Image (spheres, helix red, strand yellow):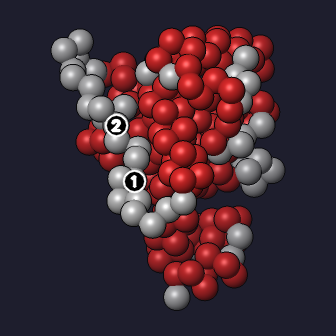
């Protein structure tokens, strides 16, 4: 039934239903965006436990402020903004001695895959590992721009930064990513152009 609702209702329709007291529609909205919100939080925070907590906090904040959502902008951009800012709040609250988990993005259960698929997964893993080495806010911007394919305008909305600040941070993050890839993963430099 949930899949049917996802297909039949737009985000704006679900939000209207939630605001009219239909809490089951919020569950549908959460299921639709939970992986995206978690991946944004994980990219910025780099620890699974913290990312899970930040994702939960993000959805609490979304629920509490749905009445402030402006349907002129995309819901996903508005929600990413909350996830991005919630994650940055977690970073600010960290104690200086927090150990960072190594994030395992790989699916190592690949037995029947072709050589090309395996190589593609290895390259993707190396790129994600390189992104994971960037500071949290920069990793978040890179992830939203390249992996979530958000526009610069959507990044401005999501981050709450000015247009020029987003462009500068994205430029610096690309340069840092290029440095990480050229020093640690030179074999994948030819797959794409970063800077």
Asked if one can make out residue 37 in the rendered structure from this viewpoint, the answer is no
Q: Which x, y percent locates residue 127? A: 54, 32
Label placed on residue 56: none
Q: Is residue 61 above or below residue 6?
A: above
Numbered disc 1: secondary structure:
loop
Front in this rendered view, residue 83 or 127 = 127
Asked if one can make out residue 14 in the rendered structure from this viewpoint, the answer is yes
> How many marks on residues?
2
Label placed on residue 103: 2
What residue lies at 70% left-to-right and 22% top-to-bottom?
Answer: 194
What residue lies at 61% left-to-right and 76% top-to-bottom?
Answer: 6
Numbered disc 2: secondary structure:
loop
Return the residue at label 1: 107
Q: Is residue 170 above or below residue 10?
A: above
What residue lies at 39% left-to-right and 63% top-to-bottom?
Answer: 111
| Quadrant of the drawing holding the C terminus | top right
Q: Is 3 displayed left or right of 192 in the figure?
A: left
Q: Which x, y percent locates residue 192? A: 71, 30
Q: Which x, y percent locates residue 174? A: 65, 18
Q: Is 11 displayed left or right of 21 in the figure?
A: right
């Amino acid at each position: 039934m949930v899949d049917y609702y996802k297909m039949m209702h737009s985000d704006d329709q679900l939000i209207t239903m939630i605001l009219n007291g239909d809490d089951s529609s919020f569950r549908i909205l959460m299921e639709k965006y939970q992986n995206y919100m978690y991946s944004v939080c994980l990219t910025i925070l780099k620890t699974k436990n913290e990312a899970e907590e930040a994702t939960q906090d993000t959805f609490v904040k979304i629920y509490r402020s749905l009445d402030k959502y402006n349907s002129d902008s995309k819901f996903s951009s508005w929600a990413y903004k909350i996830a991005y800012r919630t994650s940055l709040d977690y970073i600010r609250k960290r104690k200086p001695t927090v150990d960072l988990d190594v994030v395992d993005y790989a699916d190592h259960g690949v037995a029947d895959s072709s050589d090309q698929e395996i190589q593609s997964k290895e390259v993707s893993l190396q790129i994600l590992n390189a992104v994971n080495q960037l500071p949290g806010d920069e990793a978040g911007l890179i992830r939203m721009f390249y992996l979530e394919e958000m526009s610069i305008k959507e990044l401005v909305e999501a981050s709450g930064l000015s247009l020029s600040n987003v462009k500068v941070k994205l430029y610096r993050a690309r340069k840092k990513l290029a440095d990480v890839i050229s020093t640690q993963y030179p074999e994948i430099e030819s797959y794409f152009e970063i800077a």
